[in-house]
Image (cartoon, rainbow, N blue to C red):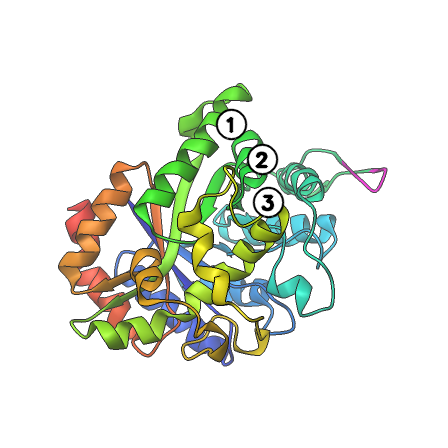
Amino acid sequence: MDFGLVLQTDPPASAVVSLMQRAEHNGFRYGWTFDSAVLWQEPFVIYSQILEHTQQMHVGPMVTNPGTRTWEVTASTFATLNDMFGNRTVCGIGRGDSAMRVAGRKPNTLARLGEAMGVIRDLAEGREAEVDGQPLRLPWVRDGKLPVWMAAYGPKALALTGQKADGFILQLADPYLTASMVTAVRTAASDAGRDPASVTICVAAPAYVSDDLPHAREQCRWFGGMVGNHVADLVSRYGEHSDLVPEALTSYIKAREGYDYSHHGRAGNPSTDFVPDEIVDRFCLLGPAEAHIEKLKELRALGVDQFAVYNMHDAKEATIDAYGSEIIPALNG
């Protein structure tokens, strides 16, 4: 199983780079960041420094979207990094939550997202693609490679992931939901004539290694609020009781009363008081190292190829070190 580290690009950027270096030293192979231009610093600038100061780490956004940058700019940025550092980027992409809403825009449609994934991949790998009716190609790209991994929860998004994406990003670590969503993605891939095993499965969630479970929960409760933004979209689209969306995902947002993006992805977020302990425990990895190992082995058995640690709490270095010394060796030793 591969491991990734997910950070926000809060200043100073040097601290982000330092944590990614620490992660690589501890056996993490992927470095991910949020991508919201208003809330945090520009990630692609920081990626160049991460790539410069690591040896093998692959980097990318978790996740970008097709609305805040034009597609040829996104493709060119990835391709430039790959040309400089040797095909070490991954394009994590979704409809856009914080990046779009903070700027006063609605998340992108799935149709637009599906088209963008193909265009960005083709341009970044040196092929011609059509953007707004105009055929384009980046003539300087040589041997470029850009895997595109899509974030999804709902049935139509899961189907699109299986049909078009190179990887699936699932932002929660509940084994029951993981099993059903991985099955949906792989079924869609098979129905589209693709090899289901070719779609990389990445589960991303907060991890906090500690015997103090109440404190760990409070440090990670924000995640249920972040996931809740996407769940609220699903409920508005499909209703509270739909055969298309499991209640195990939707029932907990009944007490949700809006969301303040100024606290997005941060411990102590006051907009996440509605998230119960049971959801924090299901969606995250909490407790002593043994509990993490047990849950990760369960996820691996479900076909998960990578676990990406959301590291937004008061124990960033300790979490990276605990994974490096105890957890990653137990999964890959």
Q: Extreme right residue here?
A: 133
Q: The residue tagged with tag 1: helix, strand or loop?
A: helix
Prevailing secondary structure of the magenta residues: strand
Tell me the number on the disc at residue 238. 3
Q: Is residue 133 magenta?
A: yes
Separation (CA) of disc 3 from disc 2: 17 Å
Q: The residue tagged with tag 3: helix, strand or loop?
A: helix
Percent of width and height locating residue 25: 28, 62
Image height of 298 relative to 28, above or below: above
Separation (CA) of disc 2 from disc 1: 8 Å
| Residue at image mark 2 | 160
Q: Residue at x 31, y 67 (%)?
A: 277
Mark 1, residues whose alpha carbon is within 10 Å: few (<14), some, or many (≥20)? many
Q: The residue tagged with tag 2: helix, strand or loop?
A: helix
Indicate which disc, 2 or 1, sits on the residue closer to the N terminus: 2
Highlighted magenta segment, given as a residue range? 130-134
Percent of width and height locating residue 14: 46, 77
Of the two numbered discs 1 and 3 in the rendering, the one whose residue sits closer to the viewer? 3
Q: Residue at x 53, y 18 (%)?
A: 193
Of the two numbered discs 3 and 2 in the rendering, the one whose residue sits closer to the viewer? 3
